[in-house]
Amino acid sequence: MSTTEMIFNLWAIHDPDDKVVYGLAGRAYYACGTDEEKMALLKQFAVSDFVLATRMPVPERFSVESEGEALSGFCPLSELYNPETTLFQEMLQELEGEIAYRYTSDSGGEGEVPEVLKVPVNPLFLITALVEDKNGFIRALVGD
């Protein structure tokens, strides 16, 4: 079934040596089509759109252990495979706030943001790992 909704590309920036996530990025899209068509769109943009994405650090409630100490604001790369993760909760809230700001700015600051422009209860999203090399160049790690 073809529907129109907000969909999201989410990225986790990690250290490939330590397999630790230290940064997040996200981008919202207003898309129409089947879930398969929307997922294809997210996959197409996942390899390059992170350059324009909103960024933030990993939330402080996440931590990793290093040399017997808990380091907050980091999480293991394996967290990306946790179906119950809340890693991107603040990112989705931030993106919803950006959408609301744009909508109210465009409408003269009046009116409530329509439900279709809010983050759905079960949003369609794609998580992609990003790696930063020693020169600061970031690239997406994607498979076929």
Image (cartoon, rainbow, N blue to C red):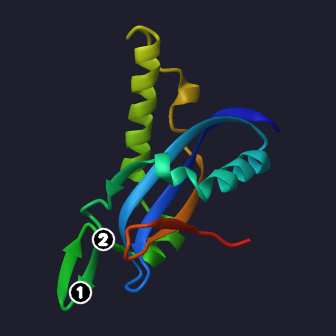
| Residue at 21% from the left image edge and 76% from the top image edge | 71
Q: Secondary structure at mark 1?
A: strand
Q: Viewed as shown, does residue 25 lie left or right of 81?
A: left
Q: Secondary structure at mark 2?
A: loop
User: Which circle marks residue 66 in the picture?
Assistant: 1
| Residue at 37% from the left image edge and 51% from the top image edge | 55
Vertical placement of residue 132 versus 52, above or below: below
Q: Name the kind of residue labelled 2 in the image.
A: Phe
- Image coordinates of residue 45 in percent, x first then y, are 63, 51
Residue with the most extreme front position: 135
| Residue at 44% from the left image edge and 81% from the top image edge | 16
Q: Viewed as shown, does residue 8 lie left or right of 60?
A: right
- Image coordinates of residue 93 in percent, x first then y, are 39, 42
Q: Please identify the quarter of the rendering in which residue 17 is found.
A: bottom left
- Image coordinates of residue 13 in percent, x first then y, are 42, 66
- Disc 1 crowd rating (10 Å Cα; few below 14, some 14-19, many 20+) is few
- Image coordinates of residue 129 in percent, x first then y, are 52, 68
Earlier residue among tags 2 and 1: 1
User: Which circle marks residue 28 in the picture?
Assistant: none
| Residue at 40% from the left image edge and 51% from the top image edge | 89
User: Which circle marks residue 74 in the picture?
Assistant: 2
Vertical placement of residue 113 versus 134, above or below: above
The quarter of the image holding the C terminus is bottom right
